Amino acid sequence: MTFLIIFLIATGIRFLGLRVDWAKSLPPKPETSLTLAIAAAHWALSLALFSSVLFSLGYAGRRGYFAPMTIITTMCLSMLFYIGIFLALQNWKYVTPEQSAGIPLGGKGLILSNSLNRNETAVILLNGTAEPLGPRVTAIPDQPLIFQESVSANFDLPPVPFGDNTPWFLKSLDIDIRLNEEMFQKKFDENFIFYLVNVFSLVFLLCSLGYAIKLSAWPLANLFIGVLAFRGILALQTFLNTPEMLEIINSFLKGMIPVMFALPLIFLGIGTLLHLYSCLIFITKRRRDDDF
């Protein structure tokens, strides 16, 4: 239930953000609401996966549930919901509803610029976004103004200016979540079994951090520690999937195993060590209690 709630809320928020980005693009590109909804759902899937595992482990830790059963249940349910929704989205991509055109934003004399700096080139649309390819004046720093009657259809314009005060850590989280889902989509297109292996290794590693969520007696502090740990895994996955890192890993492997199995093996290895560490901590505490 936690997975579905987070998934639906994140999909709605992401869909609104994609609608705004689509409305800002000039010239307006025909788009479908279903396409934007599918893109938003793909982005929300990764966020729902990380968040649901985090909240499930945190809740089970506060309630004192049996740890092995909690981990197994969380892994099975998370993979079931994630893979099931992912496969449903694959089928919805082939639906082609009627496309809709962009809504004109701004009036005549709209100024477009990628930045508010004084040294940034600006484009003034004389007829506004209603005719984005029509007459315009281009202002280049330290040069005379340039007037153009029209431009070609493939001419890219800066987006319609909107205020954006989003902190960088939220922007970086958005980028890593999008890259994470694109990575899973690529694995799915290559081989379904390989896709399952990658999903399992990620969920296995996330569930191994159950002990990190119980480090202190304060639930809020444990939640922040869990968020930082999960954010680190997301960043690590993005980092290890870069072409440069894949080349470095491949040079170390020297053809012993395919590089495509490197990331799952790394996650499975780290997850196994963390699970063993949790077991040793549990056994140590149990013996200490028995001594008393």
Image (cartoon, helix red, strand yellow):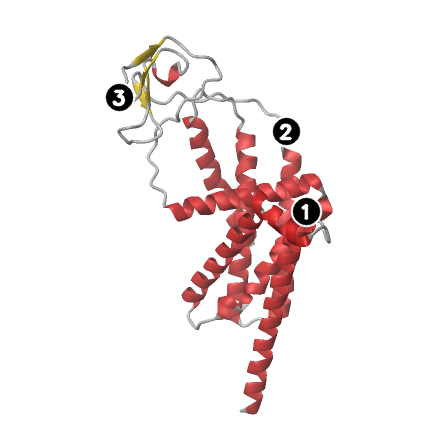
Residue at the spot 54% in from the left edge and 22% down from the top edge: 99
Nearer-N-terminus badge (3/1): 3
Disc number lying in front (1 or 2): 1
Q: Which mark is residue 95?
A: 2
Q: Position of residue 274 (x, y in %)?
A: 59, 67
Q: Position of residue 76 (x, y in %)?
A: 66, 57
Q: Is 261 left, or right, of 151 in this rendering?
A: right
Tell me which amino acid carries mark 3: Asp
| Residue 217 in the image: above or below residue 177 | below
Q: Which of the image's four quarters has the N terminus?
A: bottom right
Please state the horizontal and vertical placement of residue 109, each as a whole percent of the image. Answer: 29, 17
The disc label shown at residue 214, or none: none
Distance, label 1 to label 2, CA atoms, is 23 Å
| C-alpha separation, residue under disc 3 versus residue under disc 1 | 53 Å
| Residue in the foreground of this view, choosing between 269 and 140 | 140
Q: Quadrant of residue 91?
A: top right
Q: Earlier in the sequence, mark 1 or mark 2?
A: 2
Residue with the mark numbered 1: 195
Mark 2 / mark 3, whichever is N-terminal: 2
User: Answer yes or no: do the residues labelled 1 and 2 have beta carbons within 8 Å?
Assistant: no
Spatial CA distance of label 2 from label 3 is 50 Å
Q: Amino acid at mark 2?
A: Val
Per the image, label 1 sits on a secondary structure element best described as: helix
Residue lying at 65% horizontally and 63% vertically, measured from the top left: 72
Residue 66 seen in the figure:
no
Question: For numbered disc 3, what is the local secondary structure?
Answer: loop
At label 1, which amino acid type do we have? Tyr
Instruction: Indicate which label's residue lies in the foreground, 3 or 1.
Output: 3
Residue located at (72% from left, 43% from top): 191
Name the one closer to the observer, 139 or 85. Answer: 139
Badge 2 element: loop
